[in-house]
Image (cartoon, rainbow, N blue to C red):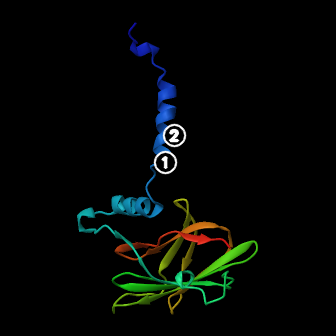
Amino acid sequence: MEDRPEDIDLPRLLAEFAKQEQRNEPPTWAVANAKKLFKLKKPGLVTVAKEVVADLIYDSFNEPLPIGVRRRDLPARQTLYATENLQLDLKIEVGEEKGLIIGQIVASKGGLEITDVRIELSERGLVIDEAKTNALGEFIFQDLPKGNYELQIVLSDTMVRLPSLPMSN
């Protein structure tokens, strides 16, 4: 017996398709850029920001433990990330309930403005908080529950992403 078009449950199929599409949502920064492009009178003059993943240069948790020490009870984790144009120094502190991320952006090549740079904090792909750098390129995220976070640095022509930052003891 062959299915006829009137036998197909179209609302059910649409609902299933919508659930699948929600998993493929673009990043919020990409949607914001697209909206800005459509508002422009001359979109041909716009360059789209490229996405760069920063390289991990140093992680204090990767250092070997001193002889005789079996467990690492350090108060904070220090990491250093780099791209072609900048370096990012992070300090990650995890308390009993909450943690914090303190960072500083340093331009490795001249011409990169480090004041008022937007930093996005994401969890599972969703932006949950934003911060702006001060005149020294510093920023902070406080009262963070334990979890895995991603940082994104939003520059005028580039989006710099960091690998996942686990915040747990």
In the rendered structure, which amino acid carries the disc numbered 2?
Lys
On the image, the x and y values in percent for residue 165 come to 55, 72
Q: Quadrant of residue 73?
A: bottom right
Q: Quadrant of residue 141?
A: bottom right
Q: Nearer the viewer, residue 35 or 111?
A: 111
Q: Is residue 96 above or below residue 39?
A: below
On the image, the x and y values in percent for residue 34 come to 37, 59
Q: Which residue is mark 2?
A: 19
Q: Residues within 10 Å of mark 2 (few under 14, many from 20)?
A: few
Give the residue at the far front of this rendering: 68
Number of marks in the image?
2
**SS at mark 2?**
helix
| The C terminus: image quadrant | bottom right
In the rendered structure, which amino acid carries the disc numbered 1?
Arg
Q: Which residue is mark 1?
A: 23
Give the residue at the far left of this rendering: 44
Q: Is residue 103 left or right of residue 158?
A: right
Q: Looking at the image, do the residues carrying marks 2 and 1 touch, with CB atoms under 8 Å apart?
A: yes
On the image, the x and y values in percent for residue 20 come to 48, 41
